[in-house]
Image (cartoon, rainbow, N blue to C red):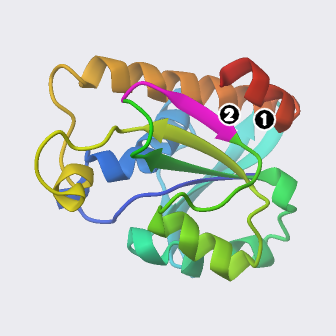
Amino acid sequence: MKMIVGLGNIGTRYDETRHNTGFMVVDQLARDYHLGAFTHLKQEAVAVSGVINGEKVMLVKPTTFMNDSGRAVGPLVDYYDIDLDDLVIVNDDLDMPVGKVRLKTHGASGGHNGLKSIISVLGTKNFNRVKVGIDHPQHGTVVSHVLGKFSKEERPKFDQAVEQAEHALEDWINGEDFAKLMNAYN
């Protein structure tokens, strides 16, 4: 089974915010493949499972807040015996412009607290990621930026990035090597 974890913050006040980019990508996959509603798991997450192009897939959204994402991801990886090659984390990235998608097979957190938490709990930096750019704030604080919504001008670029991230995930689900996908999508 492949597991795709979208990072974000729980609660309606965070819906459609930049920091919920990971949630939005997995929500789109769930809608496009008619996987149904996300249900609560005992591992501090909501998830939906199904078959996408012949491959069993679990889409996950931690119900911890972003900074504690590892608290959900670690137990899920253990419980479902997920090989790290079969795990992808989808997250927002301040260091990339809105509309940019980047795949990585390993690396540091880049200052992303959700990734820091996952790295700490898994004990490794070696797991696949799909990063979606949300850009640095032009004005105000980083916190207000990541917890803010995309502007009317940014939204079309962001929607295109969600679609591109979804295509990359579909290619991975279909058996494409993640490292090779980096060349195609980065």
In the image: residue 78, left or right of residue 135: right
Residue 173, image x, y percentages: 78, 35
Residue 15, image x, y percentages: 25, 50
In the image: residue 182, left or right of residue 84: left
Q: Residue at x 55, y 42 (%)?
A: 131
Front-most of 9 and 112?
Answer: 112
> What amino acid is labelled 2 in the image?
Leu
Q: Residue at x 56, y 81 (%)?
A: 71
Q: Residue at x 46, y 42 (%)?
A: 27
Image: magenta residue range: 98-103
User: Is residue 36 rendered magenta in the image?
Assistant: no
Q: Are marks 1 and 2 in contact (CB under 8 Å)?
A: yes
* Element class at badge 2: helix
* Element class at badge 1: helix
Residue 181 visible in the picture? yes
Circle 1 Cα neighbour tier, 10 Å, few/some/many (<14 / 14–19 / ≥20): many
Residue marked by disc 1:
173
In the image: residue 166, left or right of residue 63: right
Residue marked by disc 2:
169
The answer to whether residue 8 is above or below residue 78 is above
Residue 176 placement: quadrant: top right
Residue 41, image x, y percentages: 56, 74
